[in-house]
Image (cartoon, coloured by chain):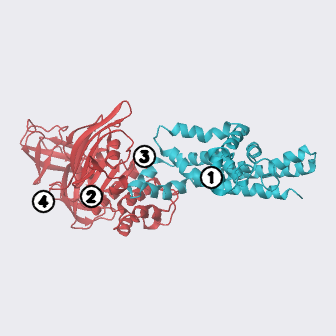
Chain colours: A red, B cyan
Amino acid sequence: MPDRLHFRLKLRRGPLFTLEAQESLPMQGVTAIVGPSGSGKTSLLRALAGLDMGVAGERRITFCNKEWDGPGGHVPAHERRIGFVFQDPHLFPHLSVAGNIGYGAKRCEVTSFDAIVEALELGPLLDRGIDGLSGGEARRVALARALASNPAVLFLDEPMTGLDSQRKSEFLPYIARAVSQARVPALYVSHSSDEVVTLADRVLELGQGHVTGWRTPPMRLTAHVVAETGPGVEVRLDGAEDDGPGASIALPLRALPGEAVGIGLPVESVHFSVHHPGAGSAIMVLPVTVTRPAGAEGQAVLDVLGQSVRVPGVMRVPSARTLWMSVLRVLPRPMVVDSTK
Amino acid sequence: MTVWPAIWLTLKLAFVTTAILLAVALPLAWWLTTTRSKLRPVVEAITTLPLVLPPTVLGFYLLILMSPTAPFGALWLRVTGDTLTFSFTGLVIASLVYSLPFAVQPLQTAFASVPQPTMDAARTLGATPRDAFLTVALPLARRGFLTAGVLTFAHTVGEFGVVLMVGGNIPGRTRVISIEIFTAVETLDYATAHVLSLGLLAFSFCVLLLVYVFNRRGGVRVA
């Protein structure tokens, strides 16, 4: 049984918005928090972090059996050991890159400063001021700064806001690697399905200041790296036969042969059909067995090369025993630490 | 020249006032920037009063307050054995009140421009509020600190009404440059008045130039 973060909040933020939410989150892997803008995602993270204490309301927060807010008192933000990455990097402009990363490191007992700098490839930037950093570099520094404070939990509040799609696809693997390498549970606020597919182990939905429920986790298959191909790697889906479907998929990812890799399947890139659709533009077409059809019990469950996959409710699955699943696009999830089970 | 005692006294008064006022204004400005207290507008109004009140009004009340027959003045006399009125200490106290807004307002503006999320970041990285203030807010507000110091100094150098009310016109003790000029004109010693006035004019211009040049350069750097 993993540690959990329990919260019950009722906070009036302005005359029109009240955050009234209650949930218990497992403190393992990445929990995505999604919802439309104005649904209270950021307010929730800030309240959990012990910021915005000026907002009137009720707070009950327990983190891993330690009361953060409640009748027993209040743990101030600086004692919660939260690695908070904000929407904008908000680096300290008067400090160098190393000074920024070291700010939290200096204030905690243990830090893996060097490992983090290496994982995020920040070594060459350490002596620079933060003025000349590009958007992506500044975000890497912000992420490193949060990780170097040896946090008990990471809070990522849309850390890729304002990056163009090219920069996003460059930055996303850094987040994925950092999160899995640091072995720190994370709350990840996002409204991008790609980010959620790549990172999240579970997805909590918010709407208008309330928790509206858990969404089916993103569809994901596991694979192992077969070979490095220069720009990326070639992986084989677990359960795939030699030269069969899924035996060879190219991924833009850095990993070593033999390493396990998660493959996220974005909902909009997956189609089901009763007959083989032909290769077309699909990067793979896989045979699928329906182990539980969609119905009263909930979402459909499929068997894909021996791997069990739950299908999100929004997807249409034809009613047949065996199907073909064509996949137009996949998102790699480096070094997947399968912590959901 | 007989003007040197006045110049020396003025500089001494300005230095002492600036040093004390920065120390006082720093916590006050930070409190005004961050507090959610209902008292904030009241304190803000009181802090700004010396800016709009005629110096004679301010000086009059300070004179009443410091007089040996008033509780504060009497207490001072008993503790130190000296009266506040017509003394250097009295001048310093009067200058502190008179120049208070010039120290508080630049600092308050500078603190207000420190982004809240940057402070939040420091807090989540393990910095206590005091630590975050010292290591983030203060370095980021350093330009405001310099502006406050320079303006306070210059404003104290130029004060007249309050000094005249509280300190009178005692050579070497309370006669500052502005009063020396006043005295010179009254005695038709225009040469001395010219020298001192031109000196003050040049000094004030240089100080303001310094502030604007520095702030401008800082602004470009920040952008």
**Label 3 amino acid?**
Gly
Element at badge 3? loop
Q: Residue pushed farthest top?
A: A16
Cα separation between marks 1 and 3 = 43 Å
Eye-nearest disc, 2 or 3: 3
Eye-nearest disc, 2 or 1: 1
Q: Mark 2 points at which residue?
A: A250
Q: Mark 4 points at which residue?
A: A241
Which chain hosts label 3?
A: A
Residue A261: horizontal and vertical position, in percent? 23, 60
Q: For mark 2, does the 10 Å Cα neighbourhood hold few (<14), some (14 to 19), or many (20 or more) residues?
A: some
Which of the 4 image quadrants contains residue A100?
bottom left
Instruction: Establish whether labels 2 and 3 are both on one chain.
Output: yes
Position of residue B79 in the picture relative to residue A53 (left or right) = right
Q: For mark 4, does the 10 Å Cα neighbourhood hold few (<14), some (14 to 19), or many (20 or more) residues?
A: few
Which chain hosts label 4?
A: A
Q: Mark 1 points at which residue?
A: B21
Task: Name the N-terminal-most of marks 2 and 4.
Answer: 4
In this rendered view, identify the residue nearer to me: B189 or A308.
B189
Element at badge 2? strand
**What is the number of the mark on residue A162?**
3
Element at badge 4? loop
Mark 4 and mark 3 in contact? Answer it, CB < 8 Å: no
